[in-house]
Image: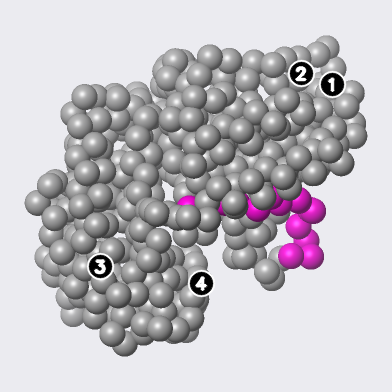
Amino acid sequence: MSIGKRIVEQDQRHVWHPFTQELTAPPPVAIERGEGASLIDYDGKRYLDMISSWWVNLHGHANPIVADAIAKQAHKMEQVIFAGFTHQPASDIATRICDVLPDGLERVFFSDNGSTAVEVALKMAYQSWLNRGETQRTRFLCFEGGYHGDTFGAMAVGQSSGFFTPFDDLLFKVDSLPYPHTWDGDETVEEKEAASLKALDAYLEKHGNETAAFILEPIVQGASGMRMARYDYLREVVRRLQDAGVLVIFDEIMTGFGRLGKTFACLELGVTPDIICLSKGLTAGFLPLSLTICHEAVYKTFLDESWDKALVHSHSFTANPLGCAAALASLDLTLSDNCTQQRLRINQQHRQGLNDVMNIKGVQHTRLQGTIAAFDLVSKSDGYTSPVGPALKKTFTERGLLIRPLGNVMYLLPPYCTTEAELNHVWQQVAEAVEDVLKVHGA
Ligand SMILES: *Cc1c(COP(=O)(O)O)cnc(C)c1O
């Protein structure tokens, strides 16, 4: 039996995969190695990873610069308790991230994945009001369709994404605001934005001084279908919330590290959130690590003679030195001129690709932001469980592409190292596959 076959057979006996209905899902593909934007299986078949392995990869698989930085650190020191101790990779990455972020965001709390970064942000926001004696600020507000991770606090603020129905009764109550997502040539966007702002004003009038924080995925909502909102509208939302004293939490776990254009979405918008969550691309997709960075004013509310006002939160692998070393190497690559050029070029190729597929009957709502291109397929049933998703995924796998539509939403989110020729090939394949699938499943 081939190595690949044996791996899959053992896997099927003992492994439980994430986000998968194990009874009906096809067997997993066993990947042996990666190189640039490609993943390579045990038969030597290549797959172009056009979703950056769930949005974590930035500079290609097995990137030698990041790999070397991790190896070097591993030979020096792999892990040390982070209460009462520190180390150079952590203090360096904290300093460098704060240098890039807007002034005021100066204090970095480490954890080890996106969901925990969100949990930390929620606890930080909530407790900072208690510490200030404003004990009435207990509410959280979010956008409809927002997704912030799969742990309980993160599920509560992401409840409207619709992924968590079995746990509905266990989640704390959160209010949500209509999200005016938009697309190329959307003629209803102003109306949607005005309605959302009106709902925000009504909410703030009633609950403004009872609200601890508002959490959002800035500019692009990822998991609920690469749903994009306009800059001026988002600036206005942030302004109104901050004027009402509500802390604004930017979940930049997907949008950070150049994915949307500038290094962070808050820099694109030119606004300063009170708290920001980073993970995924932070380590270029090598290791689990996350940061929750807060404004100095939030941090100061925790400083007191009393232990009661401390943030009592930690994970075993807080500020893992290997993750921090990977993050430092990756940040250098992300900030390089070469990477900036690559991202611009990807953006231009996406524009062309979207213009081409726009003419296919059954394609609608094309949209583009930075290196993310998305559009919807009009099918017999829409939403996350639409059959066009699995049908597309199957034909893409056969064509040597790793693309995983979100229901009827097709999107590309490639690593920044993807070459011009690779991306041209991808768009050609996408157009063909979409036409084929719409012939069977189109409305
Ligand atoms: C992926 C994601 C998370 C959760 O991160 P995990 O590392 O999967 O826990 C949170 N927020 C956003 C916007 C994400 O895309």
- State which quadrant residue 47 falls in: bottom left
Q: Rounded to the nearest whole Å, what is the CA distance between mark 3 and mark 1?
A: 56 Å
Q: Quadrant of the N terminus?
A: bottom left
Q: Please tell me whether residue 12 is drawn above or below residue 150 in the rendered image.
A: below
Asked if labels 1 and 2 touch by Cβ distance under 8 angstroms, the answer is yes
Please name the residue shown 45% across and 26% down the image: 267
N-terminal of the two: label 2 or label 4? 2
Q: Which mark is residue 377?
A: none
Q: Residues within 10 Å of mark 2 (few under 14, many from 20)?
A: some
Q: Rounded to the nearest whole Å, what is the CA distance between mark 2 and mark 3?
A: 55 Å
Residue annotated with mark 3: 359
Q: Which residues are magenta?
A: 168-182
Q: Rounded to the nearest whole Å, what is the CA distance between mark 2 and mark 4?
A: 43 Å
N-terminal of the two: label 3 or label 1? 1
- State which quadrant residue 107 falls in: top right
N-terminal of the two: label 2 or label 3? 2
Q: Rounded to the nearest whole Å, what is the CA distance between mark 1 and mark 4?
A: 43 Å
Question: From this viewpoint, which residue is outermost toward the bottom?
Answer: 440
Q: Residues within 10 Å of mark 4 (few under 14, many from 20)?
A: some
Relative side of 16 to 76, left or right: right
Please name the residue shown 19% across and 40% down the image: 345
Task: Please name the amino acid that badge 1 sits on.
Answer: Arg
Task: Please name the amino acid that badge 4 sits on.
Answer: Gly
Residue 135: x and y in percent read: 90, 31
Task: Please name the amino acid that badge 3 sits on.
Answer: Asn
